[in-house]
Image (cartoon, helix red, strand yellow):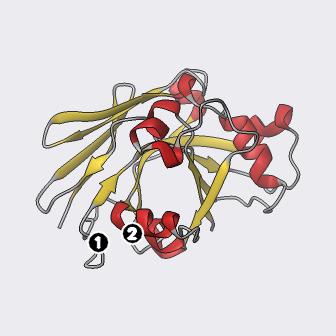
Amino acid sequence: MKIFGIGMNYALHNKELGETLIYKERPSEPVVFTKADSALLTGGKPFFIPDFTSQCDYETELVVRICRLGRSISQRFAHRYYDAVTVGIDFTARDLQRQLCSKGLPWDICKGFDGSAAVGQFIELNKLQRPIQDVHFHLDIDGQTVQSGHTADMLFTVDEIVSYISRYFTLKMGDLIFTGTPAGVGPVSIDDHLDGWIEDQHLLSFNVK
């Protein structure tokens, strides 16, 4: 199983990260990164803040699940290659990311560390009863909504992302794609309780340790 992430896929999020990451218009290609399989966090297990960061941020995202083998997939057929979605948290060691970006280095250790890809329960697309580019999702911490997004605001659509990734990586059943985070990211603290939602469906719940 592979875990892909899409960076800077919502314009307002790019602005909140500072001028070094601002796109004033849609870039020519998506920003793609990967996470190790040990990054996957499921089943409501707690997330442990790593000792190598002093600012570990949540990034709430729509996550799609690949359902068939595919390579060099045409955008018009991309919808056939994913069958379910959920809400996920792309945990980011933000202080470490700033250091890496300032040196022009890859993001692997600030994005792909153990437990950094929390995902909720998946729901099949036919049960979602909404177009993939018209889905609302949000994150609550201790009962308060801290981040919300609408997939209509993506710079690159899900189908564009699936097609683009498949040019470089063979997609396999069970692969996951984190499709990018909207504005509103922030740090988590020990004893926080996180709940993630797609529309009115509660799909993700866990504690921070």
Which type of secondary structure does the marked residue at label 1 adopt? loop
Residue 158 placement: quadrant: top right
Question: In the figure, 131 relative to 144: above or below?
Answer: above
Residue closest to the eye, 13 or 169: 13
Residue 64 placement: quadrant: top right
In the drawing, what numbered circle is on residue 96? 2
Question: In the figure, 142 relative to 209: above or below?
Answer: above
Q: Is residue 40 visible?
A: no
Q: Which residue is denoted by mark 1 in the rendering? A: 53
Q: Badge 2, how many Cα within 10 Å: few under 14, some, many 20+?
A: some
State yes or no: discs 1 and 2 in contact (Cβ < 8 Å).
yes
On the image, the x and y values in percent for residue 159 come to 73, 36
Residue type marked 2: Leu
In the drawing, what numbered circle is on residue 104? none
Q: Is residue 185 visible?
A: yes
The residue shown at (25%, 70%) is 48
- Identify the image quadrant of the C terminus: bottom left
The residue shown at (42%, 29%) is 149
On the image, the x and y values in percent for residue 125 come to 59, 33
